[in-house]
Image: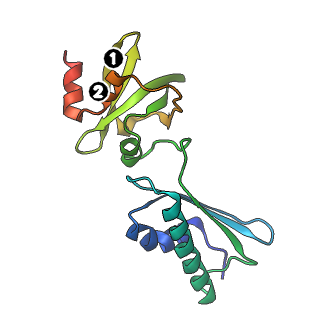
């Protein structure tokens, strides 16, 4: 049996993570010496806590061990299983990433220039998102079509966000779009 690929392992763990309402945001297999590493990044709209990650890690480990015992997988001399959340440096590439980071700052790379905005609501189809930017004292609202989204990552924010930005980010997509008409 060949060493399992990331795609094979993702398919194998899909039922386990689905029962916990989690999404696989990444799975990396590193074959290194006697022990290999399987690193899995999981997330959900409700943000998994350490207790849930521990339970899921145990379930995935048991699943891998059982599949290996049946001869369906071979990790060689063994494996190290790492289960965690993606972290803030994960690029926002799916509508769920934007939804999960609503009200946070995002750094966008637009034509080689860094642009910072606050994430607002997604539209009902999850094809566009509201971006809120501060120009001195005034707030501006723009609509970003996700199909044309530049590279975007959450920006670490140390100061408390301005309340007017949070209020605008908390509005529905349609309410925020109306702000652009004024």
Task: Give the Cα separation between the discs numbered 2 and 1.
Answer: 9 Å
Residue 56 coordinates in the image, percent (x, y): 51, 69
From the viewer's perspective, is 34 left or right of 174? right
Residue 158 coordinates in the image, percent (x, y): 53, 28
Q: Residues within 10 Å of mark 1 (few under 14, many from 20)?
A: some
- Mark 2 lies on residue: 168
User: Which numbered disc flags the more N-terminal residue, 2 or 1?
Assistant: 1
Residue 25 coordinates in the image, percent (x, y): 49, 55
Foreground residue, 161 or 15?
Answer: 161
Residue 84 coordinates in the image, percent (x, y): 56, 57
Rendered image quadrant of residue 173? top left
Q: At x 46% / y 26%, what residue is drawn?
A: 160
Q: At x 41% / y 35%, what residue is drawn?
A: 149
The mark found on residue 139 in the picture is 1
**Where 90 falls versus 103 (above or below)?**
below
Q: Quadrant of the N terminus?
A: bottom right
Provide the secondary structure element on which disc 1 rests: strand
Q: Residue furthest bottom?
A: 70
Using the rendered image of the protein, determine whether residue 64 is visible from the camera's viewpoint: yes
The mark total stands at: 2
Q: At x 38% / y 34%, what residue is drawn?
A: 103
The mark found on residue 101 in the picture is none
Q: Quadrant of the C terminus?
A: top left
Q: Residues within 10 Å of mark 2 (few under 14, many from 20)?
A: many
Using the rendered image of the protein, determine whether residue 42 is visible from the camera's viewpoint: no
Q: Are marks 2 and 1 in contact (CB under 8 Å)?
A: yes
Provide the secondary structure element on which disc 2 rests: helix
From the viewer's perspective, is 14 left or right of 156? left
Q: At x 41% / y 41%, what residue is drawn?
A: 101
Coloration of the structure image? rainbow
Q: Residue furthest top?
A: 136
Q: Residue furthest right?
A: 33
């Amino acid at each position: 049996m060949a060493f399992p690929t990331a795609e094979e392992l993702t398919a194998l763990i899909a039922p386990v993570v689905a029962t916990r309402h989690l999404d696989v945001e990444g799975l990396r297999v590193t074959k290194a010496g006697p022990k290999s590493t399987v690193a899995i990044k999981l997330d959900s709209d409700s943000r998994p806590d350490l207790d849930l990650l521990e339970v899921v890690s145990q379930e995935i480990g048991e699943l891998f061990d059982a599949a290996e015992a049946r001869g369906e997988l071979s990790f060689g001399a063994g494996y190290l299983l790492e289960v965690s959340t993606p972290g803030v440096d994960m690029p926002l590439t799916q509508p769920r990433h934007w939804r999960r980071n609503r009200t946070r700052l995002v750094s966008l790379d637009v034509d080689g220039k860094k642009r910072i905005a606050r994430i607002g609501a997604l539209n009902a189809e999850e094809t566009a998102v509201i971006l809120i930017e501060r120009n001195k004292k005034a707030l501006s609202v723009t609509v970003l079509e996700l199909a044309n989204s530049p590279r975007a990552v959450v920006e670490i924010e140390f100061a408390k966000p301005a309340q007017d930005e949070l209020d605008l980010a908390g509005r529905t997509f349609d309410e925020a779009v109306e702000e652009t008409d004024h």
